[in-house]
Image: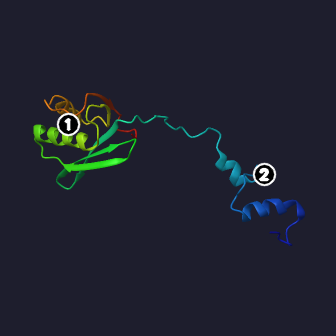
């Protein structure tokens, strides 16, 4: 696409702009500014087959425990009762439904003390589904 009103020296820039800044053109100010100087910082974290992310969310007066098996993206949620024993049994049943029976699980959480206590109580049950557990606490200001 050419613009007859532009001098020939500006035609490549005009075509570049018409194509939505594709491909990158070093003489284009917008492309140069957007390219950045330092690559974006990405956390590289390989997901294990038995890694589960847990978090508590609130919906009005309800406390809801949300769990995601990171490798398969299986998702589960239940309303917490506030009774540690009952919530621990519900979480244990969840691990069984997720297919983690007899497996070593890595539990990722954002460091909420109540959640950490419930996970540890689940491991102390006589009929605990998991063979062992590693609790990995993520600081609250960092994404999981």
What residue is rendered at 73% in x and 62% in y? 17
Which part of the image, by quadrant, shows the N terminus? Answer: bottom right
Which part of the image, by quadrant, shows the C terminus? Answer: top left
Residue 27 is marked as: 2
Q: Which sits in the foreground, 118 or 35?
A: 118
* Camera-side mark, 1 or 2: 1
> Label 2's element?
loop
Q: Quadrant of residue 39?
A: top right
What residue is rendered at 66% in x and 46% in y? 35
| Relative to 86, 65 lies left or right | right
What residue is rendered at 15% in x and 32% in y? 127
> Label 1's element?
helix
- Mark 2 packing: few (<14 Cα in 10 Å), some, or many (20+)? few
What residue is rendered at 28% in x and 37% in y? 100
* Image mark count: 2
Q: Quadrant of residue 14?
A: bottom right
Q: Which sits in the foreground, 71 or 8?
A: 71
Q: Earlier in the sequence, mark 1 or mark 2?
A: 2
Cα gap from disc 1 to disc 2, whole angstroms = 56 Å
List the single residue furthest toward the bottom: 4
Residue 99 in the image, given as x and y percentages of width and height: 29, 40
| Relative to 41, 120 lies left or right | left
Residue 19 in the image, given as x and y percentages of width and height: 72, 63
- Mark 1 packing: few (<14 Cα in 10 Å), some, or many (20+)? few
Residue 84 in the image, given as x and y percentages of width and height: 12, 38
Q: Quadrant of residue 38?
A: top right
Indicate whether 56 appears above or below 46.
below
Residue 114 is marked as: 1
| Relative to 92, 21 lies left or right | right
Residue 73 in the image, given as x and y percentages of width and height: 37, 47
């Amino acid at each position: 696409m050419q613009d007859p009103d532009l001098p020939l020296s500006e035609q490549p820039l005009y075509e570049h702009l018409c194509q939505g800044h594709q491909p990158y053109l070093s003489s284009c100010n917008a492309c140069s500014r957007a390219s950045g100087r330092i690559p974006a910082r990405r956390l590289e974290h390989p997901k294990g087959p038995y890694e589960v992310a847990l978090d508590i969310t609130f919906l009005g007066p309800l406390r809801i425990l949300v769990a995601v098996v990171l490798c398969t993206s299986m998702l589960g949620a239940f309303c917490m009762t506030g009774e540690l024993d009952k919530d621990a049994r519900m979480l244990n049943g969840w691990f069984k439904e997720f297919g983690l029976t007899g497996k070593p699980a890595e539990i990722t959480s954002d460091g909420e003390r109540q959640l950490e206590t419930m996970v540890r109580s689940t491991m102390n049950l006589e009929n605990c589904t998991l063979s062992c557990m590693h609790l990995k606490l993520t600081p609250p200001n960092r994404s999981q």
